[in-house]
Image: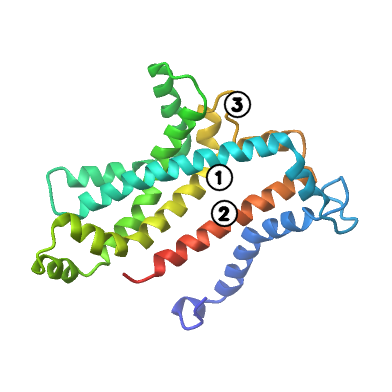
Amino acid sequence: MNPHNPLWRFRGVRSMAWLTLVYLYLPIVVLIALSFNANRVATIWTGFSWQWYGVVFDDPNILRAARNSFLIATGATLIATSFATLAALAMSSGRFRGQGLVQAMLGLPMLAPEIVTAVASLLLFLALGLELGMLTVLIAHTVFCIPFAYLPIRARLEGMDPRLFEAAADLYATPQRTFWRVTFPLLLPGILSGAMLAFIVSLDDYVITSFVAGAGSTTLPVHIYGMVRRGISPEVNALSALMLLVSMGFVVLSWWLGRKKP
């Protein structure tokens, strides 16, 4: 919060900003605190305990859902980041007919309501006769993750100094050598940043997964929702706190990589 911003001169703005932050983050703080509650009743504090984290890591259903989540997130990240990198390179190579339409299509999964993407994906898989399972979740997540991987890579390309490529051409470097010796090393932080965002978007997704997942392809968000329907328990709090920790780690790492100057 910048105290020199003219907006802060209006009465009540600062108080409203703090109330907004409290409203957004206090429930998360409470959830994390209750994950250490020794009481089986999640909302009644009786003492500090790590036991529910042990329960989480001993539950085979949670571990199976976590394995599915990480497998799908890893596969979707690798495929989506590869397509996003190729798309960013093509979009930055020069103007071509239909470039605006392609740009809009790349960002459409991010702009469209997630429930629309979920229903459309389900209808497509049913029309193609694909059995719902890990493959359909992977395909749907890949499409949904491409824009999140594309934006940091595209921003990284736009921040590169074009004189570097001109210097490489003056030194008779082939396009392939220029890419691997100049473009790729400078672009790598953007690629990693996009991959981090794509991974966490896939890992945390519930809406699309709940529509296109089949038997044996339950992910952590879907499993957590099933647990919550039976009532809030300390295991749910502990599992949610762990997912929050992983998500924050990837987001911070993506932000840090994106800040590195080309």
Q: Residue at x 25, y 47 (%)?
A: 103
Work out whether mark 2 precedes mark 1 in sequence or the reverse, and give the earlier one: 1
Q: Which residue is mark 1?
A: 204
At label 2, the amino acid type is: Ser
* Foreground tag (1 vs 3): 3
What is the secondary structure assignment of the residue under circle 3? Answer: loop
Point out residue 197 in the picture as x, y percentages from the top left corner: 46, 53
Q: Which residue is mark 3?
A: 216
Q: Is residue 197 among the parts visible in the rendering?
A: yes
Point out residue 166 in the picture as x, y percentages from the top left corner: 12, 68
How crowded pointer 1 is (Cα within 10 Å; few <14, some 14-19, many 20+) is rated as: some
Q: Residue at x 65, y 64 (%)?
A: 22
Q: How far apart are the two marked residues, 3 and 2, measured between alpha carbons?
A: 24 Å
Point out residue 45 in the picture as x, y percentages from the top left corner: 87, 55
203 relative to 13, above or below: above
* Foreground tag (3 vs 2): 3
Foreground residue among 125 and 101: 125
What is the secondary structure assignment of the residue under circle 1? Answer: helix
How crowded pointer 3 is (Cα within 10 Å; few <14, some 14-19, many 20+) is rated as: few
What is the secondary structure assignment of the residue under circle 2? Answer: helix
Work out whether mark 1 precedes mark 3 in sequence or the reverse, and give the earlier one: 1
At label 1, the amino acid type is: Asp
Q: Is residue 111 among the parts visible in the rendering?
A: no
Q: Quadrant of residue 70?
A: top right
How crowded pointer 2 is (Cα within 10 Å; few <14, some 14-19, many 20+) is rated as: some
Q: How far apart are the two marked residues, 2 and 1, measured between alpha carbons?
A: 8 Å
Q: How far apart are the two marked residues, 1 and 3, measured between alpha carbons?
A: 18 Å
Q: Are marks 2 and 1 in contact (CB under 8 Å)?
A: yes
Judge left or right: residue 178 versus residue 250: left
- Which numbered tag is attached to residue 247? 2
Q: Residue at x 37, y 56 (%)?
A: 191
Work out whether mark 3 precedes mark 2 in sequence or the reverse, and give the earlier one: 3
